[in-house]
Amino acid sequence: LAKTTQPISMDSYEGQEVNITCSHNNIATNDYITWYQQFPSQGPRFIIQGYKTKVTNEVASLFIPADRKSSTLSLPRVSLSDTAVYYCLVGDMRGNTGGFKTIFGAGTRLFVKA
Amino acid sequence: DVKVTQSSRYLVKRTGEKVFLECVQDMDHENMFWYRQDPGLGLRLIYFSYDVKMKEKGDIPEGYSVSREKKERFSLILESASTNQTSMYLCASTPHRDGGNTIYFGEGSWLTVV
């Protein structure tokens, strides 16, 4: 399973775009890249997932270069409520018989200031 | 929406007590997980189950056991609680499916062992 590396923390101001980069040098062919958001005292929740190039949804964009050894989560125009921990997860997420494990790193603590 | 429900949000138990943490999911997912989350350590996998009555150890199974008698329910058991098991416990589920699956988390159970 691919290990991920993210910055420990980031600060931003309301209205700015925030980009959080995750390194995953050992990503395998079948691996997807998934980002989760976690608020204090809550479980992580899914933000976005991609395999290659760019994915966009109503919350964020995910940029994945051709070599897939890194990915960047982009949050447009952040607000105070985006203050949270963001986790990058890499794996094939397949639930074949025998199960699978996932690896969560320490995540990136984003603090949005007024 | 998928719902993963953890029966207890906050528990206080005494050292040596047997503790049961219950988790139920309503989406017929095959895979279920128990993590613990501690400051600075991120999420660490305790046990997972890919089918009824099946279980596999995660990264930190010592001091824990699990039970999966029904597909929708996955229980974490602390046979004899100790103070170093004070933590937030997260249950999660995901289906058997190739490709990019999403992990669905419960809201967490805060356990304090005194």
Image (cartoon, helix red, strand yellow):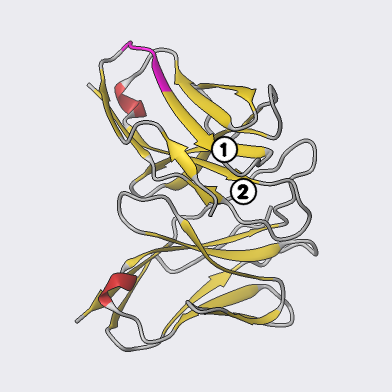
Provide the chain ID for the residue under circle 2.
A
Provide the secondary structure element on which disc 1 rests: strand
**Residue B25 as seen in the image, left or right of residue B71:** left
Q: Nearer the viewer, mark 1 or mark 2?
A: 1
The residue that appears at 30% across and 79% down in the rendered structure is A79
Q: Which residue is label 1 attached to?
A: B33
The C terminus of chain B appears in which quarter of the rendering?
top left
Q: Position of residue A37 (x, y in %)?
A: 44, 62
Mark 2 closeness class: few <14, some 14–19, many ≥20 residues within 10 Å? some
Q: Position of residue A68 (x, y in %)?
A: 70, 74
The residue that appears at 49% across and 43% down in the rendered structure is B4
- Tell whether position B17 is magenta: yes
Q: Which residue is label 2 attached to?
A: A102
Name the amino acid type tagged 1: Phe
Provide the chain ID for the residue under circle 1.
B
Closer to the camera, B57 or A8?
A: B57
* Res A34 quadrant in image: bottom right
Residue A26 at least partly seen: no
